[in-house]
Structure formats: structure tokens, C-alpha cells
Image (cartoon, rainbow, N blue to C red):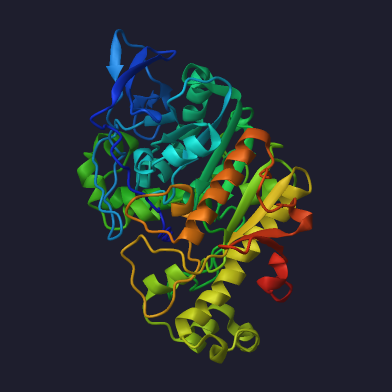
Amino acid sequence: MKILLAAAVLLTGCADARTAAATDTVVTTDKGAVRGREDGRHRLFEGIRYATAPRWDSPRPAAAWKGVQDATKPGSPCPQVGSDYAKITSENEDCLFLNVTTPAKKGAKRPVMVWIHGDGALGAGHYSNARAIASAGDAVVVTINYRLGVFSGFGYPGLRDSGTYGLQDQQEALRWVRRNAAAFGGDPGNVTVFGISFGALAIGGHLTSPGAKGLFHRAAMQSGETMMDMPAGSMLPGLEAQPSYAWRPTAQTEAVGQIYAKQLGCADLACLKALPVKKILAVPQIMNVFQSYTYGNAVLPEIPSTAIEKGRFHRVPVLAGATKDEHRIFAAMRGKIAYPESLKETFGKRAAAVAREYPLKRYGKPAVAWAAVMTDRMWARGTHAQNTLLARRTPVYGFEFADRDAPMFLPIKADFDLGAYHAGDLPYLFPEKGVKLSPAQQKLSGQMLSYWTNFARTGDPNGAGLPAWPKLKGGTLSLEPGKIRPVDYAAEHRLAFWN
């Protein structure tokens, strides 16, 4: 069994929108009216129920209601146990809520941006403060809750579409957006789905899922793992190699599910579905073990990496990339690293060749050398393959977030520089009061917000006053304060060596 470490959720804090000057604002959805709050700059609606779902079953659209429902506070997060870097807990399966942020000024036909948060085992939509994006792009921004961990990725013989329940929730939320975007001033014919890490991985799934056809018109993926494999020992010593970082075949998911069913004392589905949430969450690592999605079913007929390679994906413009030092944060979480021994475990007879290509003396510390190897071998190789294959059939704008002074907003310590770490770009799109950006970084944040929202509006990130961003064949855009420019991504990450 493979433990998937998506160490970066990575959550931004949600500032309180309910100020003393806030006033009520009411919108009528297809199921009934909701009352949100307006603070002079934004309208914010929180905790709108978009669906309900029995355990390990497909979501159903929310039932209609009479009167006006309160939408001034978040709905419950989905069941989760939290972590050292995000102390969130929940045992509530009634959790399929979403949040809508718009500019205060009434408008119509605004681009709609639907954010899928990262991690896959913890988090909730309301932790991402969408005000900056809504303002920068004159956009309607929707953040969503979806089922996580074992309640999303669990499989067992007899379950329909095992291991896809979180993906199904996201698609149900997109159907809600299609029905209701216009009521909030958005254009249901111009929907961008965007996400980071596990959220970007999910978007890779939606690009190839039959059920997602027509639900979105553009896709933006930050540090996604759609095309990434997992070499032996790459995340932790002793972990076996896996052909895919986060996609599992149905047979494997169901086999793992049977093992955990025995740990839970169950011999059939009826027993599993009747268990208290608390008892399920008490099983060690159960959330992380099912932090993946399953293919070989109606939701994902085939592994998305193969579907993309064969051209079987929805033809929408794509903006996608990774950070310059993706793996440094994972190296920090791993602890002490013995460089030669780690190379030998992962690469076997090729270890000496890798050591010559990445000599320890170049990096100073074993963890930094190891992170450079894994950043190039796993993250850059997977990202480049994804973007190159997509670009054969649809417009692709590739990027690399390269600010090695990006502020750290997680309680993760290391005795080396974490550089442009995995999800270090998140505070640049979701600025927060508690995360300090220098003036140059604030400028970069503004430029990134413009790029992303331009892309949402037109399918092209370029705009007045911004450095030119070519389509992929013209280079990958490096995003660094004062140094936005196209770079040769394959050469920078030694992909000729790895390929």
C-alpha cells in the first residue's frame, strides 16, 4: 500500500468578511434564496449547500427550500483528522457546501473561477480567501468543499465507482455553478476550474472524465501530479515504486479497502456504511492511504495520464506549471537524508550516473541535493510531459514559479533554504494579512493575479502592462520578482538526462 504525502494543502487563512459596515445581500438560486453579506468592496456568500451524499455514493443535488437561507458563515468541513500544519478536525459527513465571492458592484457575464483546494485529506473551500482574485479579475469566484481521504478514495467490492467520490462532488459543484452562475453575475459559459497540488491533480482527472464534459471552459493547474510517477524511496525510505503518484486501478483500491475493512471489524458494506465517522478516522493513516483517485470506472474510464497521452481529453485552454524547487519541502519533512544511500535505493545501478549529474558539492547539503534530483526527476519531468502532450491539441501556457524568497506560511522548519517550494506560489494568488510580501513580491502577486484572471476571461493570460507570456512552444514563463521571462524548462531541469 502506498501512502500519498500531499504535504501542501496548502491552506490560506480566511479573513472575516463580516465587518461592522457589512449589509445583507440576497440572491435567488435554483433551489431557493440565500442571504450573504456585502462589505462595500465584495459580496460574500458562505455555506451554500450544493449537494448531499450518502457515504460512498454519488452526490445528489441539494433539495429546494422555502424562505431565505443564511449564507453568512461557512458550512462544515468534510470529515478529517488534521495535521501538524493544519489543525482542522471534523466528523460531519453533511459537508458539501460552497462559497461565492463577487465584487460588490453589480455586474453580469463575469468570468467564473472555481477553486479546488489542495491536499485531498484535509481542508475546506472557505479557508481560501478569494477577495483579491474577485477584485483583480472582476470575477465570480467559487470555492468548494468535497469529500476527502477515506470518504473520497475508499473502494470495496460492490461499491459503484469506487475511489472517485471527491471527483464526483467537484463535478456536482460545477453543475451547480452552471445552473446558478448568472444569478451571482457570472457567465455560465465561461467557467475556469483552477487548483493546486491535489486540486490540480483532480483537474487532470476532470480533463479526461466523461462526466466533466462541458462543465468548464479553461483549466489552470499549479503543481499538479497528473503525469507524475513515484520512484522507490522518493517520498520516504522503504516505499516501493509506483507507476503513478496518485491514480489507482479499481482492483488495487478495492484490495486496500478490504484490508482496512478487516481492521474496522467489518465483513460487508452494510457494516462499513453503519460505522461512526469517529471510528473510521481513528484508524492510523486511513485518510492518507486513500488520498488518491481510482480509474477503471464510469467516472475515470482510464488512467488520466494515458488518456492525455492518447489525446482523449476535453479541448480547453490550459495554464499549468510547477515551482522551481518543488521537492525541498518534502525533503524537509523526510528528515535526515543520506545522499549516496538514497540514490542507491531509488536508482540502483544508475545511482552513480545520477550522482555525477547532481554532485553533492554543488548543493552543499544532502537534503538540497536530494531535492534537486527529485524535483527534476518527478515534478519537472511530469509537468513537462503533461504540458507538452496537452499542447499538441490545445493552447497551453506553461509557467515556473521561481521566487526562492517566497514566504513560508506553514510550520515546517529546515536547516536549509526551502527556495521556491511546493505551493509557495499560493499566497501570491490568495494574499493574506498574516503572510508578508516585500514590495517586489507584491508586484509579482499583482501580475500573477492579472495573468490568471486574464486567462479566465479570454483563455489567454496576456494583457496590457504585463511581460509577454508565449504559448508553450515559445518557452515556459518563469515567475520571479522583477524577472518574468520565458525559460527553457527542459534544459533547466536536465530532462534530456532523465528522459
Image coords of residue 316 (percent x, y): 69, 37
Tell me residue 244's x, y (percent). Answer: 56, 58
The residue lying at 48 percent from left, 50 percent from top is 198
- Above or below, 66 relative to 76: above
Classify residue 415 by image quadrant. Answer: bottom left
Is residue 499 shown to the viewer in this render? no
Residue found 46% across the figure and 64% down from its top: 406
Q: Residue furthest bottom?
A: 361
What residue do we see at 30% from left, 59% from top? 85
Q: Residue furthest top?
A: 66
Q: Is residue 294 above or below residue 270?
A: below
Look at the image and tell me whether residue 142 can be seen: yes
Quarter the N terminus occupies: bottom left
Q: Is residue 240 left or right of residue 48?
A: right
Q: Position of residue 24 (x, y in %)?
A: 30, 19
Identify which residue, 269 or 409, lies in the foreground.
Answer: 409
Pick the front one: 125 or 21: 21
Relative horizontal placement of residue 229, taking residue 68 as reference (left or right): right
Depth order, front residue of 475/92: 475
Left or right: 83 with respect to 125? Answer: left
Q: 11 left or right of 401?
A: left
Work out whether 141 lies above or below 154.
above
Q: Quadrant of the C terminus?
A: bottom right
Where residue 216 sits: x, y (%)? Answer: 60, 31
